Image (spheres, rainbow, N blue to C red):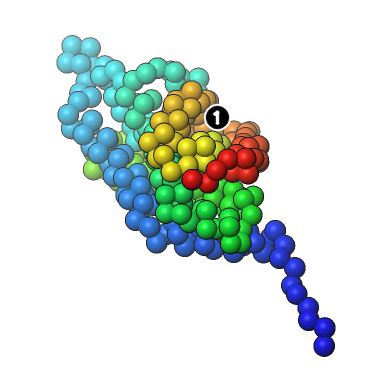
Amino acid sequence: MEAKFEKNTFGKRLKTMLKVDFKRMFTMPLVYIMAGVSLALPILILVMTSFMGGEPDPTTGAEAAGMFTNVWQAISSVSGGNAMAMDLTTMCNMNLMYFMLAVLVCLFVADDFKSGYAKNLFTVRSKKVDYVFSKSLVCFVGGAIMILAFFIGAMIGGVIGGLPFTMEGFNAGNLIACLFSKIFLVAVFSSLFFMLSVIAKQKTWLSVLLSIGCGAFMFMMIPMITPLNANFIHVIMALAGGGLFAVGLGAISNVILNKTSLV
């Protein structure tokens, strides 16, 4: 009887790689710590600012400048407003999660090189392109979890801080589009941070510095692509941008892995 060997296709290899990477991520405390921080951060921000500042001016009755006047400012700002201003509401909102994503991606990838897992993986079985696709998708899921955790934390913080949930200049549909845009935009930043982590490999400090530095240059595009009054166009822009960056930077990451040492 002739022996038949099942072809090891890219899809089967990727499925196996995804299973391993998801298991690694969700058995490590890192993703739970980052999700917990993402949940607690907006609660602390909204509660502390509502209790320690933001009282109206006694002479004019105007709200204190730069303070949160409603819960939704912790998520994003309405386009056409003062989104470029460097105040508390624009610097301490959900956009901070993209910088925290850098920490998640860098620590997660660096652990592969520090532990020798990556070198053993590429030596024994997996191709580098499988690793790039799998790790990019897993990091995207981790970032999406952080975004959702921040949203839940903002709702809790708004209730505790007594901030209004009034929607001014947008509606519930816009809010949903905003959240989807922010989640899809995670693919842009996670792909960038993954590429920089591949460059730095086991040097965690270098990958974090490079990621935060590059992320800072892209920071101002976030409120433009993901405003509170986002619509279907913003969602498509974020989705298309995430896909293009994931493919383009993923290809560069694959080249880097093929052309450089794994240690």
The count of marks equals 1
**Residue 229 point in image, percent of width and height:** 51, 31
Question: Depth check: 232 or 23 in front?
Answer: 23
Residue ID at (58%, 57%): 123
Residue ID at (18%, 32%): 51
**Residue 176 point in image, percent of width and height:** 51, 42
Question: Depth check: 167 or 18 in front?
Answer: 18
Residue ID at (55%, 43%): 261
Residue lying furthest top in this view? 59
Label 1 crowd (10 A; few <14 / some 14-19 / many >=20): many
Residue ID at (44%, 26%): 213
In-image side of 224 versus 153 (left or right) = right
The correct choice, above or below, for 139 with respect to 207 in the image is below
Question: Depth check: 95 or 162 in front?
Answer: 95
In-image side of 53 versus 175 (left or right) = left
Q: Which residue is mark 1?
A: 225
The correct choice, above or below, for 18 with respect to 71 in the image is below
